[in-house]
Each structure stands twice: as C-alpha cells, then as structure tokens.
Image (cartoon, grey):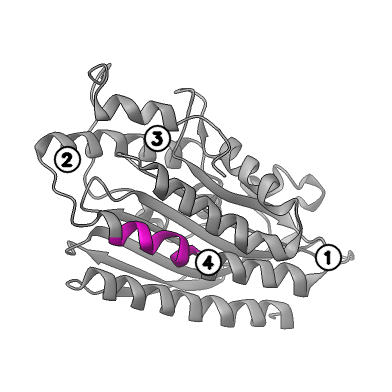
Amino acid sequence: MKSEQVERVEAFLRKLQDGICKTIEEVDGNARFIEDAWTRPAGGGGRTRVLREGAVFEQAGVNFSLVHGDKLPPSATAHRPELSGGGFIATGVSLVLHPRNPYVPTTHANVRYFEAQKEGEQPAWWFGGGFDLTPFYPFEEDVRHWHTVAHDLCAPFGADFYPRYKKWCDEYFYLKHRAETRGVGGLFYDDLNEGGFDQCFQFMQAVGQGFMDAYLPIVERRKNTPYGEREREFQLYRRGRYVEFNLVYDRGTLFGLQSGGRTESILMSLPPRVRFEYAYQPQEGSAEARLAEYLKPREWL
C-alpha cells in the first residue's frame, strides 16, 4: 500500500516526465517519443519513453518508474546496511539525452524517492538525484551557466547545498580507472531527509524543474554549430566513457538490474552509437585535447 508521501511524489514525477518529454519534442522539432508501459512481476512498473533519430537528439530517454518489493537489493543496502532485509518502495524519473551534434553536450538527470522498512521497525525514507553535463567540445560560458542554475536552485535551501552536492557530483561521476570525471559535473545528492519531508520534496521539485533551465540554453546555442567527420568520430569515442561509467559504477543501473527491473528501460541510458579505440591520444593542442582540461574537479563560479 502506498503511503501519502509516495502518492504525492508519484503525482509530481508523472507530471515531470510529461513536461520534459513535451519540451524535448518541441526543441527537436522532428521526432516524437514512443512509450513502453511495463509491469514488474515482483511489484510495480513504469513508463519508458524514447525518442530516436531526431533532428537535435539522436536518442533521448525519459523514464518513470515505481517499484516495490520485500527485500532491498545490495546496491541500496551497501550504504544503508541497517535496512538490509527490509521491504521497499522506490519511485523516480531518470533521463539521458544523447544529442546528434558533437557540440551539444550529453546530459543526465534523475530525481528519486525511497521508503524502506524492516518488520517491526519505523519506516525510513530519503530522496536522491541530481543532474550532470558531459560535453565533448566544452565552452566556458556553457559550463558556467549550467553551474549557475544549479547554484541558484540550491540557494533557498541553504548556503551549503550547492558546494556540498557539487562536490558529491564531482566525486560520484569519476572514472577511477581513467582518472577523470565523466564531464563537468553539476549536482548529486542521496539519503536526503534533513529538515522534514516537505522541505526535501521541495528540493526534489527544484532539481527536477531546474534541469531544463540549465540545459536548454546550451542546446539552443550549440545545436546549429557546423561539424564534420572528425568531430563526430570524437563524439562517438568519448561516448565510450559514458558506457564505461554506467556499466561499472552507476548505482541506478545496479539497482535496476538487481531489483529485477526492465532491462531495456535500465540500459536506455546507453548511447545508440559508440566506438572504442585502443590507446587513443588526441593531437597536442587540438580542440579534442582541450577536453582533458575540463575533466577534473574545479570551481566554476
């Protein structure tokens, strides 16, 4: 049975998915989302929406899910061991956008809510989520805009929210085996229950609604930038890092697979086209080499 809190969050997330999909279709101007509604045998289900071969987006996926079960999977209990063996309900919206033009960054966003309870104990609840940006040909003004929106949406909740969650994002989206960040960061938070449910829910809404404010101006600035085969090949190569992170480190991917979620929906985050190249080194002083300057944590504001 859903709690009142779950029902409130679910209603917001369904509207958020609808609004983001509508906006992406308007920006793309060519393709439309197709929806797969799915059910999970162990409990729950979701709506997977994917747009493919658009004018702006080569692939865009926006997922809503609400799943429940009798036992939290290992990916969830690794940092909450006291809840091991308890039942859970989890709901969220997760999206990944893979643009066609290499000058438009790939991006990811997620907002989610968990409730978990062991028999005979009080239920625990928490929020998590954030958004991050993965450019291939970065522009300083784009990165500053991205982080300004992140800072400003955090500001009403406390002076420490942006620096704390910006730092957490830098640390979370880090490929240890490559010694580089996945992109230029943004926000990442988890286990949020400080200040009561209403305040935490308001922060989730601010992150979910602020994402498009952060991303769309960058898309509009870069979507018509001319590019050739060189830039396209570099984009496909760098998408390989996205694959590496999602399959090796990403908590959401692990949770989805371990909890028996829909595989196609979970792996929707992977790019439609990607390439790997052995021991690739960009030409010294090239635009491709410049990316390395951005793949290390730094203060953007």
- Give SS at disc 1: loop
Question: How busy is the neighbourhood of tag 2: few (under 14 within 10 Å), some, or many (20 plus)?
Answer: some
Q: Is residue 219 magenta?
A: yes
- Label 4 close to label 1 by CB (< 8 Å): no
Amino acid at circle 4 = Gly
Name the residue that disc number 4 marks: 210
Name the residue that disc number 3 marks: 244
Give the number of callouts.
4
Amino acid at circle 1 = Gly
Q: Nearer the viewer, mark 2 or mark 3?
A: 2
201 versus 295 height, above or below? below
Amino acid at circle 3 = Glu
Name the residue that disc number 2 marks: 232
Q: Which residues are magenta?
A: 211-220
Q: Earlier in the sequence, mark 2 or mark 1?
A: 1
Residues 272 and 290: in front is 290
Q: Nearer the viewer, mark 4 or mark 2?
A: 4
Q: Earlier in the sequence, mark 4 or mark 1?
A: 1
In the image: residue 47, left or right of residue 137: right
**Residue drawn where x is 52% and y is 59% of the image:** 110
- Label 4 close to label 2 by CB (< 8 Å): no
268 versus 275 height, above or below? below
Tell me the CA gap for discs 1 and 3.
36 Å
Q: Main secondary structure of the magenta part?
A: helix
Amino acid at circle 2 = Arg
Tell me the CA gap for discs 4 and 1.
21 Å
Q: Earlier in the sequence, mark 3 or mark 4?
A: 4
Image coordinates of residue 247 in percent, x first then y, are 43, 39
Name the residue that disc number 1 marks: 195
Q: Earlier in the sequence, mark 4 or mark 2?
A: 4
**Residue drawn where x is 30% and y is 39% of the image:** 137
Q: Nearer the viewer, mark 4 or mark 1?
A: 4
